[in-house]
Image (spheres, rainbow, N blue to C red):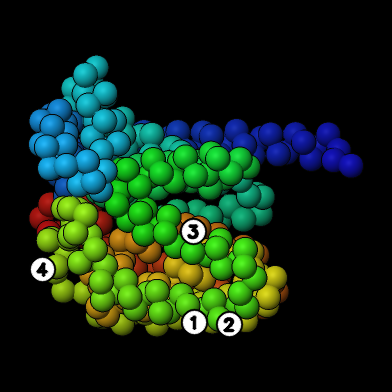
Amino acid sequence: MINNNTLDGFFLYRIFCLLFALVFAFILCYLPIEQLVDRNNYLVYSSFSSEILSSRFNNGLISFLFNEPFWLFVNLFLSSVFSAENTVRIIIFFSTFITFYLVLANFEPKFLLLLLLFLFLPQVLKNNVIHLRQGLAIALFLVGWFSNNSKSKLFFLCLAALVHTSFIIVGFGMFLVDFLSRIRVSNGIKNLIYVVVGILIAIFGLVIASTFGARQAERYAEVSANISGFGFVFWSGVFFLYLSQGKDFVTRNSYSLFFILLYLATYFTLPVTGRVLESVLLIILLSSLELKKWKKLLFITVYTLYFFLNWLPRLGQPWFGWGISNY
């Protein structure tokens, strides 16, 4: 039985999460648009969303659906009431608040410090600083993720895919994981299938995207994949640590394992793979909260090192490396 002190503490913690998310969302949305990379580009969406929608619809329904129409509808709706600049700021505020509140409020207070380290990882935080379209998609996805209703989960996943195309791959991955679990494929065979699927996506991903008219296909076809190896080593370690936790952990966190394997299988060949990982990065990191004893301690130690190694090169740079002069 939960006593009144426990209920009071839980309520106060939720209030803290609410206030923290509100304050930080205000801070991020009021950062100067003209000094941060990509924020000026989002003014174009809010200023010309109607024209862009019309142009993309003229390319055909399939191409229209694969080019983030809900993102444009959001901009069209907001810009009909607010200025272009305030439209961008509202999107930043909404995305940041939803993401921070849901992640903090859905777990026990004892995880607070670790959750903040997850949220402030540069690869996570930048989606609320410069990659605003992806940030909105992640916020919508998290609304569904933390819902107890399966229809809500599907609805918000679809909305996220109509805001950022990386969630089309995320949706496909989740469907594959659910299908293999439903037909009771063993974890070993699952992992083999995940690797094969990752290789196929690496080979044919951009071709398929181009076939459906996704505008990112041409852009990423001309970009070289990140082959520094740092991310590959770190996430390989996380994968094997998760795998070593046992069958029950693997079963409960199949999505996380799939997306790590997808990232590793496409790391050296598919430029877009990092963006897909970023879309589910919080989900993958949150899986670590279920690790036990020394494995959790090992993860926290290595992750903390990873966190600071990612921030270290940014210290002293304008806007922590997200300023226009840095790009």
CA separation, marks 3 and 1? 16 Å
Please name the amino acid that badge 2 sits on.
Gly
Instruction: For mark 4, give the secondary structure.
Output: loop
The image quadrant that residue 263 belongs to is bottom left
Q: Which residue is disc 3 drawn over?
A: 175
Residue 192's tag is 1
Residue 291: give x, y in percent of width and height: 65, 70
Residue neighbourhood size for the residue with mark 2, other residues' Cα within 10 Å, grouped as few (<14), some (14–19), many (≥20): few
Please name the amino acid that badge 3 sits on.
Phe
Q: Of callouts 1 and 4, which one flags the residue occurring earlier in the amino acid sequence?
A: 1
Q: Marks 2 and 3: in contact by CB < 8 Å?
A: no
Q: Marks 2 and 1: in contact by CB < 8 Å?
A: yes
The image quadrant that residue 235 belongs to is bottom left
Total marks in image:
4
- Image position of 118 (left or right of 41): right
CA separation, marks 4 and 2? 35 Å
Instruction: For mark 3, give the secondary structure.
Output: helix
Q: Which residue is disc 2 drawn over?
A: 188
**Depicted 149 relative to depicted 78: above or below:** below
CA separation, marks 3 and 4? 30 Å
Residue 118: give x, y in percent of width and height: 47, 58
Please name the amino acid that badge 1 sits on.
Leu
CA separation, marks 1 and 2? 6 Å
Quadrant of the frame with the N terminus:
top right
Instruction: For mark 2, give the secondary structure.
Output: helix
Q: Of callouts 4 and 2, which one flags the residue occurring earlier in the amino acid sequence?
A: 2
